[in-house]
Image (spheres, helix red, strand yellow):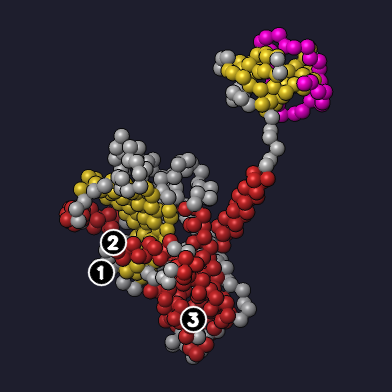
């Protein structure tokens, strides 16, 4: 069927290589791509007609298109325009949902901050209020909520074992509603409880947002950088000195809101809903990003973790061949920034550790043999264990460098 319409824009020029059926300038023919004859020639069919055209852009076989005939300076010119299907209601809903997620991620990335500023502020609040003349202004419920937040830290000194780490990971990964229904605790739930109490104590004051630029958002492709322990902000220290409970609550509330925003960003990243950094691989090396508060002595650092199942080809079925990849970063006053990537392929272990400080690098290098022995005593086959000076840069190292892939 031939219809006469104005020539549309944004279409691909083609040249007939066979005789076309009788058509005139201004005609548009509905066609379908029947086959590719060469790398640049495709056969179009329309009803009982078929003809071949040559062009720089090849449409896929089966694609529906329209052949346009326009007037050129030296005769007819032919163009092929792919047919764009009308959006379905389901596609429209999906597009709207993705736009909402994009808007949410943009807002969260602006508001978010790490857990380290929150724990620094909470430490100062617990230390400052008992010595303040306004100690009675801090309700016991707020004190208890802050203490509960400290109780969720992973103790890094002493006997740190697998079950304790697993419990800390579950607390960090479990949404508040799920934890409440299961009768357990979670980091998100503790933050939400503290936020509600601080809102009441603030007496209508809005949360005070972070003054500095936001840190890089959590992601599956960027290298995890630990959050160093911090001192309380000057604004919070001054408010503590004045004993102004409402102002203190607003300042601490801003840190709680920022930590919750970062947790929501981590959840979006773990679902693959965040756009990663430019140059990141299309296939992420990791499946989940988490941040754990870590207590080392009196210092509270934040352990940034990325965890991924290594779906090595030939390892079919969940649990058939347990292969995992874990990458983490930590930044403590005594060590500086440290990052590690660990691959566990069944009992075989591959690990590389980076240390930013030269002194830390020397200490870790000196402990390599002892660490290899401790890991072997746990039943692991230590295939590769290295310590490197400096920190790795983004984009992340390609897959396969640390874990052998079994074909």
Q: Which residue is mark 1?
A: 158
User: Residues under labels 1 and 2: Cα distance?
Assistant: 13 Å
Mark 1 vs mark 3: which is more N-terminal? 3
Residue under the image location 75 percent in, 21 percent down? 29
Tag of residue 142: 3
Which region shows up in magenta? Answer: 1-26
| Magenta residue check for 4 | yes
Q: Secondary structure at mark 1?
A: loop
Residue lying farthest to the front in this orientation: 48
Residue under the image location 63 percent in, 78 percent down? 204
| Magenta residue check for 400 | no
User: Residues under labels 1 and 3: Cα distance?
Assistant: 29 Å
Mark 2, other Cα within 10 Å: few <14 / some 14–19 / many ≥20: few
- Say left or right for 150 vs 273: left
Q: Nearer the viewer, residue 84 or 109?
A: 84
Front: mark 3 or 2 = 2
Q: Quadrant of the N terminus?
A: top right
Q: List x then y, in percent, for residue 126.
A: 43, 80
């Amino acid at each position: 069927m031939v219809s006469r319409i104005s020539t549309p824009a944004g279409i691909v020029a083609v040249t007939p290589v066979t005789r076309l059926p009788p058509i005139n300038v201004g005609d548009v023919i509905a066609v379908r791509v029947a086959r590719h004859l060469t790398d640049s020639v495709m056969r179009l069919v329309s009803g009982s007609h078929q003809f071949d055209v040559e062009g720089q852009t090849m449409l896929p076989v089966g694609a529906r298109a329209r052949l346009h005939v326009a007037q050129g300076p030296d005769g007819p010119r032919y163009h092929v325009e792919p047919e764009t299907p009308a959006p379905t209601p389901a596609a429209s809903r999906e597009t709207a949902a993705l736009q909402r997620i994009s808007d949410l991620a943009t807002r969260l990335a602006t508001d978010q901050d790490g857990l380290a500023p929150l724990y620094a502020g909470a430490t100062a609040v617990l230390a400052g209020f008992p010595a303040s003349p306004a100690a009675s202004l801090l309700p016991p419920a707020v004190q208890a909520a802050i203490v509960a937040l400290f109780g969720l830290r992973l103790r890094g000194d002493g006997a740190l074992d697998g079950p304790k780490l697993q419990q800390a990971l579950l607390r960090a990964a479990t949404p508040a509603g799920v934890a409440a229904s299961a009768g357990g605790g979670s980091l998100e739930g503790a933050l939400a409880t503290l936020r509600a109490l601080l809102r009441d104590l603030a007496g209508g004051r809005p949360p005070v947002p972070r003054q500095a630029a936001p840190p890089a958002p959590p992601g599956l492709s960027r290298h995890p950088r630990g959050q160093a322990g911090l001192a309380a902000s000057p604004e919070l220290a001054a408010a503590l000195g004045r004993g102004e409970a409402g102002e203190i609550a607003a300042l601490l509330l801003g840190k709680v809101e920022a930590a919750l925003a970062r947790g929501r960003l981590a959840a979006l990243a773990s679902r693959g809903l965040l756009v990663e950094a430019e140059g990141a691989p299309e296939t992420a090396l990791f499946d989940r990003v988490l941040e754990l508060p870590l207590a080392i002595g009196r210092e509270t650092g934040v352990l940034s973790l990325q965890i991924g199942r290594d779906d090595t080809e030939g390892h079919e079925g969940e649990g058939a061949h347990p292969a995992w990849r874990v990458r983490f970063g930590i930044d403590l006053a005594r060590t500086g920034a440290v990052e590690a990537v660990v691959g566990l392929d069944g009992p075989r272990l591959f690990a590389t550790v980076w240390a930013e400080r030269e002194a830390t690098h020397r200490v870790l290098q000196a402990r390599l043999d002892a660490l290899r022995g401790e890991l072997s005593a746990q039943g692991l086959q230590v295939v590769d264990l290295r310590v490197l000076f400096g920190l790795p840069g983004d984009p992340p190292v390609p897959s396969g460098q640390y874990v052998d892939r079994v074909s």
